[in-house]
Structure formats: structure tokens, C-alpha cells
Amino acid sequence: MAKLQQRSYVLCLAFSVAVNLYLILNLYGHGAGGQWELSWSRRAAEEAEHVAAVPCSGHGRAYLDGLVLDDGKQPGCECNSCFGGSDCSQFLTDCESNADSGDPFFLEPFWMEHASESAILVAGWHRMGYTFSDKSYISQELERLIRKVHDIAGNAVTQGRYIVIGAGSTHLINAAVQALSSSSTDNFNSSSSSPASIVVTIPYYALYETQTEYFQSVNYKFEGDGSLLNLSSGTKRVIEFVTAPNNPDGKLNKANFQGPNSAAIFDRVYYWPHFTPIPTPANDDVMVFSISKLTGHAGTRLGWAVIKDEAVYQRMLQHTLISNLGISRDAQLRAMKLLNVVVEGGGKEIFEFGYTTMRKRWEKLKNTLSLSNRFSLQKDEPLFCTFFQKRRGPSPAYAWVKCEREEDVDCYKVLQEEANVYGRRGSVFGAEDRYVRLALIRSQDDFDILLHRLNQLVSKEDDSQPQTYINNVTTHEFLRRKSRK
């Protein structure tokens, strides 16, 4: 009898444990076979999948935060340049070829191939406070991944360096100017009370001037071309913007000013294997990078600075906190998710995809303009790349085009009127308007249309009179050829 009761107790206990385990697994979302069953996130996941599945004829995208059609339910398509209609299937023959903006859509196909790994779905109560649990404003995991990405790419020394996160590189550029020009800075061996001179090398990224003048201060003043700066007094403080690779011409610029009264801010947002050979890890005092040109997510607005000096780091950190009270937790989460994909497989996939895409575009553009006596490109100088372990040429984000004819003093106008191509004027970069910048990092549609228009323009060079852009049958032939690829 005692043994029977004992067996009954054991059976009851086993049954109770089994029931509790079943309830616990179901309570926390596990179903049969140990598979996770969606609960509160199901609706959001379905919405995301539904929007992502809208094809837009391959010439546009639908977005969760985008346009909605008249029925209030179906997401609308946002079409690429030169495409229209409700499903982006209509080719607009009168359209402008957009080679102006630097939206890095060239990496979009990579992320479509890595949809599941890069997707994010978070609860409505995710990170509602101002800080993380350790009272910091920066995710320690994000900082770890940033260091790891640089170690993989071999493009920057981060060991023993400080990292500041900002709302894109533009936020950090001004933070660096403020930090280096501060009257209390230890970076200058000068008792001068005059403002530090902010200088550049022409051609230069226009935001350096625009931002410096907008956030005017008694501590600094934009002086423009550094080669024209008068340093006869010997006590003048100089802060130099060094862009490597340079925007717009892709050169690996170096600092022109040395000595105790000089400091440099190295803008290295394009210093990735996508765009340039990596001959050696950069080891500058202040280096600025961004997620925009690494992963292509310009809209996430997240960048970082790698800094040697602790005092400069503290001042830059203070600037980001005062101006922005830290960086969006959501942006940091997305950046962390993207960088996790980047570091998988030692960064091989994204860097090879980016380099292959940009190199093909560069070669096609070079081949087209090599047939021209009217237009020329920046020089293409190969270097040994430590990431790819081979000698390779650049695959620049932009083409720096020069109009060679004496009468073509406004290259922007020439391309606009004769090819319906819109780039960015050379004067925007402090150079002559005989130059124009053409963006190569936009969508494949944008690049194909740009190349087609330039091919048409170059083919007309034998004509004695300047040509005005006219839509003709070759445009439709181009579209048909493109659809067959």
C-alpha cells in the first residue's frame, strides 16, 4: 500500500512539473518543438513584411512611414528618379538625371539580401529613458562593434583611443571645431587670444564653411584656402579640415600644417574598402566616421569620432550632450544591428559587394569619358590595399568632371542643358565652375540613366554646334535594354 501511494505521489509530481513547464513555455511564447511563437509583435512583423513585399516594378520602394494610397491601407510606392506611376512602372523621358545628392542607395541590394539579419522590431516601451542602465548615453555594445569594424577593415587605430558618438558626422565636425578652438585647449602652444583659423584644401566639402560660419564663435573663424593663410606672426592658431578620401575628388589628402599651433580634423567618412584602397590604418588625433557611408544608412544619422587626447574627447562629449542630450537610443540600436551584419564573416561580404559595385560604375564612367576630348576625370592612382591584400585602384563615390573646352566655363550648365544631367557646381567646393561633381553612389537606376545621358553627349562631340538635350527613341531603347538585364 505504501509503495502504491509513493508511486502515486511521484506520478502527481511529474504531472504537475509537466503542466507547469507547458504553461511557462506558452506564457513566454514558446510553442511546440521549442519554436518561438509571436504574440504582441505579430502585427508589426506582418505590417513590415507586407510593405516590404510591394514590388514597385523594381524602380522604387514602399516604406512603413511612407505614402499611403487613397484606400488608407495599401502603402504607396516612392519611385526612383525618372520613374513614376502608382507602381513606378512609367519611365519619365523628360526627367532630370539626378547626380547631385549623395544618398548611398548603391548598398540597398546588399541589405535586401540580408533582410532577416538586419531587421529590427522593438517593443513600444524600448529604452524610454534618457540614459542606459549605467547612466551613460552611449551603448557599450555599439562602441565595441565600432572598434571591431575598424579592426576588420584595417582603416583606423582604435586601441587606446576614445570614441564619441554623434548625430552623423556633421554633428561631430562642429563638436571637434568647438573642442579644438576652445580658449582652454591644451592643443596649442600659443598665448594668442585671436580666434583660431579654420582652413581647408580646395576642393573641399562645403559644409565645413557653412557650419563653421553658422555656429559663429569668438574662438574660431573660417579662413578658407589654407595656402593663402598669412602665418608671419608665428602665433596664429590653425585648425585644418583634412578629408581623406576627399569629397569631391577622392584624393587621400594629408595635413598641410604642422607644429604646436596647428591641429587637424580628419574627415574619413569615405575611408572604407568600398571607395578606396586602405594602405594603412589611420592614426590621426581626431578622425570622424559615419554609418552613412559604411552601411549606406544616411537617414539613421549616426557617426563617431576616434580621438587620441582625453581633454579633446571630454570637450567633444560635452558638446554632444549639451547640443543633443545624447544620441537617439533607436539610432544606436539600428546601427548596432547593422554593424553586427557587417562584422559577420570578417566584413568580407559588404566590402566586396560595395567595392565591386563602385568599381564597375567607375570603370564604365571612365570608359565613356575616355572617348571624349571635351570632358576629363580625376586621376585614378592604384595603391596596395591591406584589406583586399592586393594593389587596386579607387572606386570613388563621386566623379570630379572638368570641362576642357575654353568656352565651357560653366560645366554644370553644359551638362544640364546638353544632357539633362544635374550634378553639383565646382564653386560649391571652392573650385572653378569649369568643374562639376557627379554622384556615383545613388541607385542603379540613377547611375544607368546618368551613364546613358553621358554616352549620348560624348557621341555628339563631332558636331560643330552645341547640342540641346532632346528626348528621342534612344531613351526608350535604353529602357528596354535595361529591363532585359
Image (cartoon, helix red, strand yellow):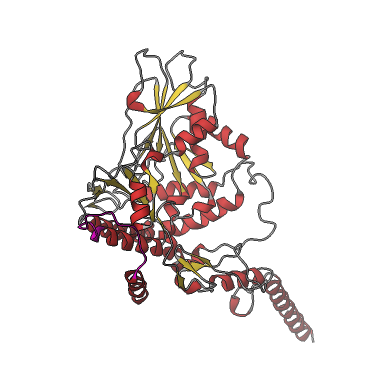
Which residue occupies the foreground of this view, 240 or 225? 225
Going 44% across and 40% down the picture, which residue do you hit?
288
Going 28% across and 57% down the picture, which residue do you hit?
365
Going 57% across and 37% down the picture, which residue do you hit?
320
Name the image quarter holding residue 247. top left
Instruction: Mark yes or no: residue 438 visible.
Output: yes
Q: Main secondary structure of the magenta part?
A: loop
Which residue occupies the foreground of this view, 453 or 132? 453
Reply yes or no: does residue 34 show up in magenta. no
Give percent across and percent down for residue 115. 49, 67
Name the image quarter holding residue 18. bottom right
In this rendering, position of residue 19 left or right of residue 400: right
Name the image quarter holding residue 26. bottom right
Give percent across and percent down for residue 300. 53, 52
- Quadrant position of the N terminus in the picture: bottom right
Give percent across and percent down for residue 24. 70, 71
Which residue occupies the foreground of this view, 469 or 79? 469
Vertical side of 344 occupied by 408: above or below: above
Which residue occupies the foreground of this view, 415 or 182? 415
Give percent across and percent down for residue 409. 31, 42
Going 50% across and 72% down the picture, which residue do you hit?
56
Vertical side of 73 occupied by 381: above or below: above
- Quadrant position of the C terminus in the picture: bottom left
Magenta region, residue range: 458-472
